[in-house]
Amino acid sequence: MSKSYKDNETVIRVENISKSYHISHQNKPGYGTIKDGFSNFLHKPRFGMGKSNPENDETFWALKDINFAVKKGEVFGIVGKNGSGKSTMLKILSRIVDPTTGSISMHGRVASMLEVGTGFHPELTGRENIYFNGSMIGMSRQEIKSKFDDIVAFSEIEKFLDTPVKFYSSGMYVRLAFSVAAHLDPDILIIDEVLAVGDAQFQKKCLERILSGAKRGQTILFVSHSMTIVKQVCDRAMYLEKGIAKYIGETEFATEKYMEKNIASVTESTFADNPKKDAQFKEINIYDSDNKVVEALDIGEPWKIALQYTVKEKSIDTIVAVEVLSNEGQPIFMSTDTDFDKKMGDLEAGKYSASININDLHLLPGVYYLRCSIQSPGKVAHDVRENIPLRIRQAKNDVRSQYFGGKYMGYIADKVKWQIDRSD
Amino acid sequence: MRSVTQDIYIEANKRQSVSVRELWLYRELFFFFAWRDIKVRYKQTFLGAGWAILQPFLATGVFTLFFNKVAGIQSGNRAVPYAVFAYLGLMYWNCFNSSINTVANSLVASQGVITKIYFPRLIPCLAAAALSIVDFFFAASIFFVFLIVYHITPHLSGIIFFLPALAILVASSLGIGIFFAALNVKYRDVRSALPFITQMLLFVTPVIYPITSIPAKYRTFAFLNPAAGAISGIRAAMFGEPISWIGVLLSCISTVIAIIIGIWYFNKTEKNFADII
């Protein structure tokens, strides 16, 4: 997303932030009992009554030397795997925990949403919770009063406003909590994953509400596992790995780094039998031109998708389809077993294996996903397997890696011939 | 108001947690916390705020039966029936006792919000004390019914000392309470130990018996307990007996000490609350 900045003022400056935790292997980290405290005290070396056990204590760096600055009106994303330190970063920025080293300065009114519905009490009614939660996340009573009707309308729970929230469905609960949060208008907003719940439509509505704030000059720090949302909303992003900022800059690159690291952990090429399904995939693999199972291909390299599927009961009017989706979830290519000659027909019970040779689909470097399905179009989807990652690598000698920061727009890598003549 | 633009500066190991200015900034949140605690306390109860009255009322009945009738403890003033004497002491004691215990548990009870939102961590503690004050006023309304039933005219000094005595108890219970609240974050033993400690404290405080039952040479020590000075002081004032100003002064001093220790320990440990709670 691009927008023009009114001023280039830096509103968040993070310098040398580190956070360490002591892990004791003897006890659980966190709170203990007085007995533990007392025995630790006795065993402290300076007390001279025992030896400390260095192998039992370990310093764990949740964050190490993080530096970044965010300008006014910018949407800054933080991505990384679970345990990479992003939540710790947000907690430090939100002043919930103290950093071990470093400093942060923030200019303006800061509000953070690390959870939806913080402080919601089940015994209180929707109305009461709006007030309490609103005040909790930083709104004044006056402000809540003036926005109250908007919040209620946004949440679509008017009828249940005076019902204790313990009687709410989880969907209603989340909608109400979102609505309060979405009406908070600070100068700097810190959001963590909160958009990951609720139905898609409502999520979209919230995202739009929050982004409209960014357009008005609000600065947003955003953490999410959804690369689609991060790419959609963030101007810049930081990729964290094991507490270290591996990349700070363009969102596209940061999300790609995340995908590269995550691919290995999400890939599953064989699928367990599900007795409820009439027809299902057993195995889906991607082969490169050397006939090896891979997850990444060079740009322009011919490749192959191999499918193994079983059909338990004869299935009428059924097709098998594969699709390639962009990182943002946009379908960009589709093929089915009826592509050439075969008419859509019945799938007899049995085991099948299909090999789909793809020579002519040239994708630009980036991360894509495969979606494979066995379906009777418009009637029933017997089995769908999605999010099978496919990464297209930049070829070093490819001329396209030299310009535009190595990043051509779009998905299609086909080269076309330019006939250029001088016309002067 | 918090809506005023303000700059935030975070630096490692520089957190200043107990700041009057910041507490003032967050005063609305304090009211919301207190309001929520009061609402929640009496939701889905049949008697509601009646519990605030019933507890000291029933306790007075039991005390009168066993300590007065059976054990023969007297109010120390012929004009004052034991029940009135006991109720007055108990309503102050209950406020002190419940304030210490709810304040000490307030941080652990708010752990969900403490790990998700920043606010001065003293706010839930203060709100917990406010809850005890509200309960006190419910209980106090019945005390005046007692006075009418027993045809006792309260002395003017009793009316004057009514709120200052409460203030001493609330202030000292806050000092003690926030110390234990901070300790409770790390050591959950507090949750089990504290009610026992305060229960024992009841017996060394002149609630069941008059302060005059304590031999004069030990009374100075008894007054180091802030509840002793406040409770014996309000009783003396209410029933027109001579007030032990030395006792009240000693209780005030120990209250100040309790607050200083409480805030000092709270300040020292507060930066780790969210990490270990």
Image (tube, rainbow, N blue to C red):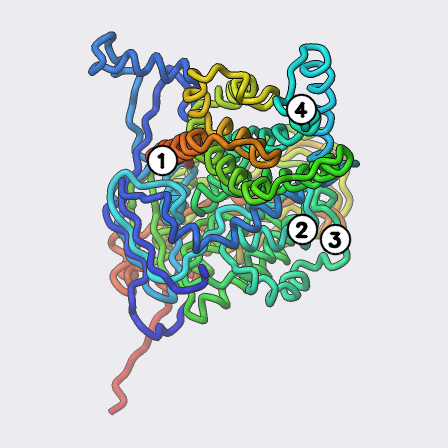
Rendered residue at 70%/26% (across/down)? B81
Left or right of A344? Residue B128 is left
* Mark 1, other Cα within 10 Å: few <14 / some 14–19 / many ≥20: some
Q: Nearer the viewer, residue B142 or A419?
A: B142
Q: What kind of residue is marked 4? A: Arg
**Distance of mark 4 from mark 3, alpha carbons?**
54 Å
Which type of secondary structure does the marked residue at label 2 adopt?
Answer: loop
Rendering quarter of residue A158? bottom right
Q: What kind of residue is marked 3? A: Asp
**Dot 3: chain letter:** A
* Mark 4, other Cα within 10 Å: few <14 / some 14–19 / many ≥20: few
Q: What kind of residue is marked 1? A: Ile
Residue B160 - label: none
Residue placed under numbered mark 4 in the picture = B78
**Distance of mark 2 from mark 1, alpha carbons?**
86 Å
Which type of secondary structure does the marked residue at label 1 adopt?
Answer: helix
Residue A162 - label: 3
**Dot 1: chain letter:** B
